[in-house]
Amino acid sequence: MFVVILISLGAALYYLLQDRGTTKRTVNALTVRIAISVSIILLLILGYYGGVIQPHGIGG
């Protein structure tokens, strides 16, 4: 998932430099990146409340 986020961020940068604001490809690439990041956060929250992820603290 991290690699997909980086690819989406790179695509957004590429579209920003190439299109000069004439298309919405930059916005779409950034929207994909945000959606993936939010879904990762939601999966972590669901895993914590579902008991799949157990917090252990530092050094524990």
Image (tube, rainbow, N blue to C red):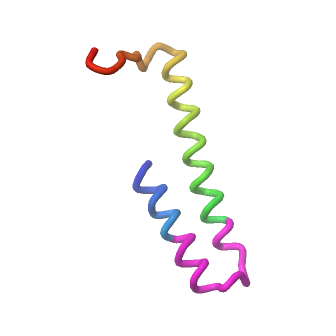
* Rendered residue at 68%/67% (across/down): 27
* Rendered residue at 52%/39% (across/down): 40
Measured as percent of width and height from the top left, residue 53 is found at 42, 20
* Rendered residue at 46%/64% (across/down): 7
Left or right: 2 in relation to 20: left
Measured as percent of width and height from the top left, residue 44 is found at 50, 29
Q: Quadrant of the C terminus?
A: top left
Left or right: 43 in relation to 21: left
- Label total for image: 0
Q: Magenta segment range? A: 11-27
Residue 14: within the magenta?
yes
Q: What secondary structure is the stretch in magenta mostly built from?
A: helix
Residue at the outermost left position: 59
Residue 23: within the magenta?
yes
Measured as percent of width and height from the top left, residue 15 is found at 58, 78
* Viewer-proximal residue among 57 and 34: 57
